[in-house]
Amino acid sequence: MDLIEFCKRCRRRAFEVYSSSVCRNRKIFLLLVVLFPFLYYLWSRLMLSMQPARGLWDDHPAFYLLEYSLENKLMMLQKSVDEFNANIQHEPLNTDENPFLPFVGNGMFGVVIKQDSLIYLRKDRVLTLPLNYHPIVWVEFELMSKTARALDYVRGVAHTVSCYINDICITSQYYAHRTLPNIFVQDIEVVNPASYNAKVYLSREVFDQDSWAQAEVGSIKLTKNDVGARNGSEEYDTVVGPVVNEFDEFFVSIIAMRIPTHFYAKPKSKTSLQILTAICESDHNLPSSGDKSEVKAELQSLCLKQLKSALKKTAEKVYEEHTNAWQQLWATGISISKSKAKDALNGDKINATMYYVLSNVRSPLDPPPLTIPTGCYGNIHHTFQATNLWNDLSTFFNVQKATSFWLLTLQKQGCDNLVALGAPGVMQAMVLSFGSFKFSSQHLEFNMHPKFLHRDYTFRRLQYGNLTQVNVTVQLQEDNKAILLVALEKSDRPFYACDGGCLDGPVQLGRMKLQFPVKLTDPVTAILYISPDRKHLDDMRHAIHVQEVGEAPAHEHSVIALHKHGHHLGGLPTFFWVSVCFLIIVFHLFLFKLIYNEYCGGYQEKKNFQERHKIRYSKL
């Protein structure tokens, strides 16, 4: 009997454990159901806290209409942004946007686009000498708004776009004029689709005479003939004073339009206003003694002449001449395939850096003939490898530091003749340095090591003298080997090219792209030679002195995958993702079956269990 009683107790205990476990699981499930909304709320708040801060009105229904109006205004720049030729910054900054500094300059002066910005003059190589004058005119409207800024590298123009709740949009364009080097321009456009006059407020930081020692403030009034049909005041404020730094002393004269406190934008119309500011410098290294009033008078007269020269042109003509000059600079350039590798250098930062460097260099009004820059670029390592040339570009200090390093590097690597030519020469020198192109007295050679040709490159319009432009493309094939494609954009005489070692003999170039293999020599030499002298290239095979020449090996798949996909695994096949989806579906079906058996079939199983035990107990 003791054994039978013991078995009965074991069965009862097992039943109690089973029942309690089912009950406990149900309690846990109910607890999770209750806690899930609370956990979801905490998770959503955490995600929101990680996003950029939103404004006070961002949850207002009209906020979404403002965003729509703003994006419509920015559509004109979207193609340039996609091609890395422009940068857009919303306020606050979106997570996928670059915080590049909104800056305009022409080598004579520069301005950061913010309300309290100063004018920066040249100090040594770059524009870092602050002048305590605020040229920016701020445009305001007393309604809820959404604002974005943009910087167009190819046209050399900064934009500020603000759209308001009543559908009014105000756009300001800023540029340091490239062909009128003493003129800073701000174009204001107000689009008023409403049926009433819109009152628009204008403001400029008040000039603090105490911050500029010995500065003299005055005013002049231009005639109607000087201003022409332009909108704006005929009254202009003047400031002239000395500027002293550790290198020299000189005078600066500023003539700026006196702005009204407000104006009215007519209903269902577009109102435009162009504000010109003339900024002029005297000769440097003035004598320390003597009367300098004559120097100031001559400088003011010159500055007024420059301003009147700009005012004689229409606002459209002023803008067109500036943008055409910038677009001519960008005729030479580089294109590079986008890399998804961490911290990889891509077109957005490359073009932004080139823009900032060009903004610190003047364009000659009468450019001299472009001679062949023998020895440029002199370093065997291309500048993509130099990390200190690719600084963060979000602050004025970092931008000018990177610009100074660039100009110093180009000057010390044999490109000083090109740098002396101004902005066109600097652009040529930068593109040469990207590919380690080097001019000798009789040829141009491409010195980039084959191991770095794991991305697609296109070097546009390399100037070989004044009348010849060469395009060189590096293209990665499906077998992970690179090839070279070479063509002439224009030429005044025949040109020839040969690949590494020049063992295959020179081939005449034309407007159609010719393909060359990438060869690796021992010791390492250039992978391409271009020259107008065929005999010179024929002789090069006997002058290069290499021990071994062969086609460069294919790049490792992991390297190519890293740039294309952001990791070493590369693009996974479709079968892999189908298998993953199948396993996920099977897992969820199995999970559903377990839950169903636990909560839907549990009662029936418990009842059957009790019935079986009742029968057994009754028999006992």
Image (cartoon, rainbow, N blue to C red):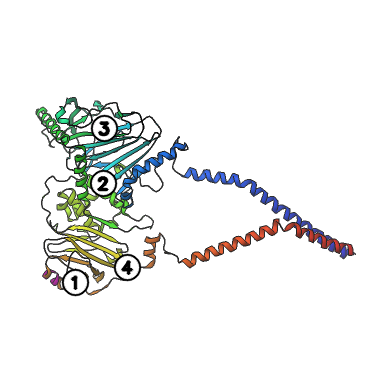
Residue labelled with disc 1 = 502
Residue labelled with disc 2 = 356
Rendering coords of residue 162 (x, y %): 35, 37
Of circles 4 and 2, which is in front? 4
Q: Determine the secondary structure under disc 3.
A: loop
Q: Determine the secondary structure under disc 4.
A: loop
Viewed as shown, does residue 4 lie left or right of 85? right
Residue labelled with disc 4 = 477
The reply to whether the C-beta atoms of the residues labelled 2 and 3 are less than 8 Å apart is: no
Hey, what amino acid is under mark 3? Answer: His
The disc at residue 452 is: none
Hey, what amino acid is under mark 4? Answer: Gln
Give me the residue at 28% from left, 70% from top: 552
Residue labelled with disc 3 = 134
Give the crowd class for mark 1: few <14, some 14-19, many >=20 residues within 10 Å.
Answer: many
Rendering coords of residue 257 (x, y %): 22, 29
User: Observer-nearest residue: 37 or 271?
Assistant: 271
Hey, what amino acid is under mark 1? Answer: Cys
